[in-house]
Amino acid sequence: EPEVTQTPSHQVTQMGQEVILRCVPISNHLYFYWYRQILGQKVEFLVSFYNNEISEKSEIFDDQFSVERPDGSNFTLKIRSTKLEDSAMYFCASGAGREASEAFFGQGTRLTVV
Amino acid sequence: AQKITQTQPGMFVQEKEAVTLDCTYDTSDPSYGLFWYKQPSSGEMIFLIYQGSYDQQNATEGRYSLNFQKARKSANLVISASQLGDSAMYFCAMRANFGNEKLTFGTGTRLTIIP
């Protein structure tokens, strides 16, 4: 069964450092997303990406965040200068279309900023 | 704007019993989809079931069924014959079928199955 793959599964970084979270979406999907879940809280939308550009971003997705699809298969989330409050589980998701009956998530990257 | 409400922060259910997890939603979009996800302690988000707003029948996937009541804007998840492995957080989510495609999540229900 096709799946969304995220690496690394866990990353610890020092405050102020840059991190790149990587995702390989399902190959025939066209819509890609990043979500964030702070420990014990609900899942929050960060950004959606379609046709090689951002289609929507939340107010959480400020200038320190960026996304890229560098090579047609990987989908990355970069946090330029991490803060303590960026500690969370970050999920990548992909979907086949707007009315797709499934939306698959990767297993998540747990980011810990110290 | 879309909103999902899950009013049960936690539930305890005896093994083999059926359990209903509540979800109500609010949207002005005429076409939308409703999703349920399971999040075990390991953290991943596992897709369980989907219901389209124009689907005439309630969705079913194995032991999972979705009790969709459009007029009441509710999309409750029913798990039949619960198992110990069903212990997890369960999230209800929705997506408009045009415009943005993001999922909006509820706050979740922690389900604990008691042997």
Image (cartoon, rainbow, N blue to C red):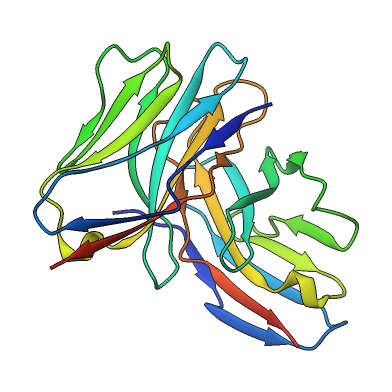
Instruction: Kindly indicate the quadrant of the structure image that contains residue B56.
Output: top left
Is residue A76 depicted above or below B21 in this figure?
A: below
The one nearer the camera, B12 or A23, is: B12
Residue B57, how many percent across, how many down?
Answer: 24, 16
Q: Residue furthest right?
A: A63
Left or right: where A45 falls relative to A103 = right
Q: Quadrant of the N terminus of chain A?
A: bottom left
Q: Who's the residue at 71% across and 62% down the image?
A: A77
- Can residue A98 be seen in this snapshot? no
In the rendered structure, the answer to whether residue A82 lies left or right of residue B57 reads: right
From the viewer's side, name the closer residue of A27 and A63: A63
Q: Is residue B102 above or below residue B57?
A: below
Q: Is residue A39 above or below residue B13?
A: below
* Residue at 51 percent of width and 33 percent of height: B94
In front of the other: B110 or B57 = B110
The answer to whether B70 is drawn above or below residue B77 in the figure is above
Q: Please report the residue visible at 36 percent of the width from the left and 27 percent of the height from the top.
A: B51
Residue B58 x, y percent position in the rendering: 25, 22
Q: Quadrant of residue A54?
A: top right
Whole-percent x and y of residue B43? 45, 68
Q: Quadrant of the C terminus of chain A?
A: bottom right
- Pick the front one: A81 or A24: A81
